[in-house]
Image (cartoon, rainbow, N blue to C red):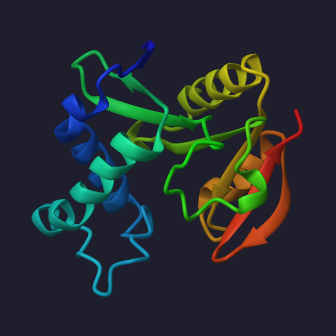
Amino acid sequence: MSVDRLEKPTDHLTDLLEFVFRIYRSTGGRYPALEWVERKPHPEDFRTFAEVYLPFLRFRLEEEFDEIYVLKDDKGRIVGTVALVHNLAEDKRVWWVPERLKRDGVGLIEFFMVDPEYRGRGYGERLLGMAIDRLQGMGKEVYVITFPHLEAYGYYLRRGFVKVMNYREFVVLRFQG
């Protein structure tokens, strides 16, 4: 499997939405957190999930992410994703990023997920390593903003990230190598 950059991410909305729903279902509705939604969809209700998440996904692809990469299986199905946000000094609507990180020397890893069926095979390491290398190659300090209660939080800590601060309901981590 190769890691491929999506040149026109919105052309892949349906595939990305289906992928994120598989993650949502596998986590029992814990991720993505959908923290802005009063009544979250049931983890088996794709239709309602799509109604809630599709506008947010479109916004992220069009407005927040600077690059997005996917890992696909031999049938062409997305099994992993990672997005990079590296133009933080621009006037982006990234309310979830602390002001002190909105500068040229910072790059964020976002939208990092691996389908549960493919975990434990090194695909997450591959995606995360590629993202770190890409951002460092641009001369960026690498950060992740996540929820402290997610499995991903411990994953990042085991891969060389350290906690920098709490911010709203999130925790900010920086890659130390």
Residue 25 shown left or right of residue 14 in the figure: right
Report x, y in % for residue 70: 41, 26
Residue 135 shown left or right of residue 4 in the figure: right
Report x, y in % for residue 86: 62, 35
Residue 16 seen in this snapshot: yes
Name the residue rendered at 73%, 36% in the picture. Answer: 104
| Figure quadrant of the C terminus | top right
Report x, y in % for residue 13: 21, 39
- Outermost residue toward the front? 91
What is the tally of numbered marks visible in this picture?
Answer: 0
46 vs 56, nearest the viewer: 56
Name the residue rendered at 29%, 24% in the picture. Answer: 8
- Outermost residue toward the right? 176
| Figure quadrant of the N terminus | top left
Name the residue rendered at 72%, 61% in the picture. Answer: 99
Q: Residue 115 lies in what quarter of the image?
A: top left
Name the residue rendered at 70%, 28% in the picture. Answer: 132
Q: Is residue 149 above or below residue 11?
A: below
Q: Is residue 127 above or below residue 96?
A: above
Q: Residue 10 lies in what quarter of the image?
A: top left
- Outermost residue toward the left? 47
Residue 108 shown left or right of residue 61 in the figure: right
